[in-house]
């Protein structure tokens, strides 16, 4: 039955692509469209309200990716992004042998990248989610802020940490960093290095682009090697109470506004701090009696992105202002005239297609502006995706940029040079009109991965006077992972770029 529904939706999607070309429709409230398959009518006079909502804070410890660096936007201003992370032991109560000696400590964090070609010199990669190329410094501090997994003040539910808690976390840092990574700038080159295999021997391996940085021996000698057999390493909970985390803070020493923001894959199994050491059972061993070993510290379970938005500004007005990070979103109310909705519900229409087309305000957004390729819409009241999202047969798990294109189109351009995003809401509108489904508020955000919803808690400005039942509680987490922004025309725009809900329907005889 599920497969039949998906097939039906696919066939309907094919019909919609051929039946809903805007050039065939007039701007009037209800117009006839001639088609070889059926005569479709357009209704585009429904009342819509859209409001821009600046984010006050959002939960940022349940993300798939984490950003660090600086970003500057000529419309929305500047912000910076830092990371606070716990470390976890590879295994509790480690045994490093009788006479261990630490040789090196290496921090490894993969970048997001795609292999684009391969030749005799190796694999060529293209980096993803790197915004700007200015080198910056990264300072690594020991944090003394205890990160809990459960919230005792909220019935011991999972602890939430937020994007606006940077000042609090920084008040618990050690005075000086234990490591400064100078002139950090992600490279698209593959990385070759030696790694210890299961036989205790070194293998030369080649990996996708990633950060590989040496860390100070004395710091980790004291933190790990000197504490073997103590209570601090007896369990992960003991260790995370003793060593409460690492704070990664970007530093801009140029004195000017820069773009240098990188998305780091801290959730990868290959993201870790590796302690390379040799050990033996005798105090003065021969080469044959030395065994090479590696012990790892992994990131998690609490990793938090914090953002300094003191230099950020969210404009106001009739336009729709969307900004990633701790930026801004939009709330959309459809059918704000109850009498109109009742009239539509009594009309006995078959909804062939319904969409919202958002035109970019070309007066505010230049060709060079770093706009998002995708927008994401969701049900605010029920904290979930729409049915159109669920049954979109164009879903592509391997290529998020080309996924769910029926429901959520990519940034496009018409034959007049107008850039736009089209969001199809056919099932959603059909259910409201024909099945008396609740006309819920919709949230609109920028996204760097439409395959991920991952609702996280959020607070926005201006929700104080909204009934609690309808208040915004969550947003999709990918919004925090991109700094990109856009400006769209709203329903108050008097010209042809005005936001409208286009409903294509046929009447039952």
Image (tube, helix red, strand yellow):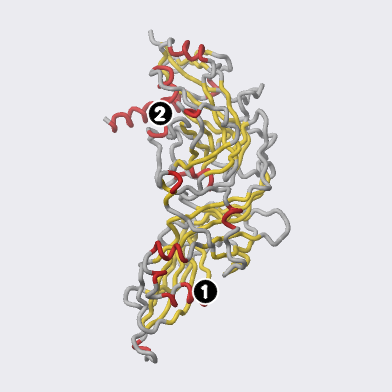
Q: Which residue is mark 1?
A: 219
Q: Residue at x 47, y 47 (%)?
A: 160
Left or right, 355 with respect to 498, comes to left
- Residue 119 seen anywhere in this rendered image of the structure: no
Left or right, 327 with respect to 196, comes to right
Question: Where residue 323 sits: x, y (%)?
Answer: 60, 41
Question: Where residue 124 sits: x, y (%)?
Answer: 49, 60
Say few, some or many: other residues with alpha carbon within 10 Å of mark 1 (under 14 / 14 to 19 / 20 or more). few
Instruction: Give above or below for 130 relative to 285.
Output: above
Q: Residue at x 47, y 72 (%)?
A: 223
Q: Which of 338 and 324 lies nearest the eye of the viewer? A: 338
Q: Which residue is mark 2?
A: 14
Instruction: Give above or below for 188 relative to 364.
Output: below
Q: Residue at x 37, y 32 (%)?
A: 391
Residue at the top extreme of this rendering: 509
Q: How many marks?
A: 2
Q: Which of 262 and 470 lies nearest the eye of the viewer? A: 470
- Secondary element under disc 1, as helix, strand or loop, is helix
Residue at the front extreme of this rendering: 153
| Quarter of the rendering occupied by the N terminus | top left
- Residue 159 seen anywhere in this rendered image of the structure: yes
> Marks 2 and 1: which is nearer the front?
1
| Quarter of the rendering occupied by the C terminus | top left
Whole-angstrom CA distance, mark 2 to mark 1, is: 61 Å
């Amino acid at each position: 039955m599920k497969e039949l529904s998906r097939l039906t939706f696919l066939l309907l999607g094919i019909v919609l692509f051929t039946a809903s070309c805007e050039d065939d429709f007039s701007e009037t409230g209800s117009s006839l469209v001639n088609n070889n398959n059926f005569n479709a009518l357009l209704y585009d006079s429904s009342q819509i309200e859209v409001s821009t909502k600046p984010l006050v804070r959002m939960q940022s410890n349940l993300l798939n990716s984490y950003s660090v660096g600086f970003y500057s936007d000529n419309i929305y201003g500047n912000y910076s992004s830092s990371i606070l992370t716990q470390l976890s032991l590879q295994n509790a109560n480690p045994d490093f042998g009788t006479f261990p000696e630490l040789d090196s400590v290496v921090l490894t964090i993969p970048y997001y990248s795609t292999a684009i070609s391969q030749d005799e010199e190796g694999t060529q990669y293209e980096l993803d989610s790197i915004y700007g190329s200015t080198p910056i410094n990264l300072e690594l501090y020991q944090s003394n802020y205890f990160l809990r997994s459960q919230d005792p003040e909220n019935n011991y539910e999972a602890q939430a940490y937020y994007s606006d808690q940077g000042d609090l976390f920084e008040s618990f840092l050690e005075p000086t960093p234990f490591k400064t990574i100078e002139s950090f700038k992600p490279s698209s080159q593959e990385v070759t290095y030696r790694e210890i295999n299961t036989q205790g021997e070194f293998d030369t391996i080649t990996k996708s682009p990633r950060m590989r940085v040496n860390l100070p021996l004395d710091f980790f000698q004291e933190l790990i090697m000197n504490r073997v057999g103590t209570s601090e390493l007896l369990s992960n909970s003991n260790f995370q109470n003793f060593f409460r985390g690492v704070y990664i803070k970007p530093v801009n020493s140029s004195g000017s506004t820069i773009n240098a923001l990188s998305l780091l894959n801290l959730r990868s199994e290959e993201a870790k701090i590796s302690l390379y050491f040799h050990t033996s059972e005798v105090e003065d061993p021969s080469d044959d009696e030395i065994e090479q070993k590696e012990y790892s510290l992994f990131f998690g379970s609490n990793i938090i992105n914090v953002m300094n938005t003191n230099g950020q500004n969210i404009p106001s007005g009739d336009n729709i202002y969307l900004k990633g990070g701790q930026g801004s979103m939009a709330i959309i109310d459809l059918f704000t005239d109850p009498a109109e909705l009742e009239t539509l519900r009594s009309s006995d229409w078959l909804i062939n297609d319904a969409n919202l087309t958002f035109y970019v305000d070309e007066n505010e957004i230049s060709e060079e502006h770093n706009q998002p390729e995708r927008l994401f819409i969701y049900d605010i009241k029920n904290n979930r995706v729409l049915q159109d999202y669920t049954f979109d047969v164009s879903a592509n798990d391997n290529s998020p940029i080309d996924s769910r294109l029926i429901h959520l189109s990519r940034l496009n351009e018409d034959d007049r040079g107008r850039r736009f995003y089209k969001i199809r809401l056919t099932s959603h509108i059909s259910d409201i009109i024909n099945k008396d489904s609740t006309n819920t508020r919709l949230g609109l955000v920028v996204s760097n991965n439409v395959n991920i919803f991952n609702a996280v808690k959020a607070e926005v400005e201006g929700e104080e006077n909204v009934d609690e039942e309808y208040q915004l509680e969550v947003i999709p987490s990918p919004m925090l992972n991109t700094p990109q922004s856009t400006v769209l025309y709203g329903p108050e725009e008097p010209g042809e770029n005005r936001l409208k809900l286009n409903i294509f329907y046929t009447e039952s005889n």
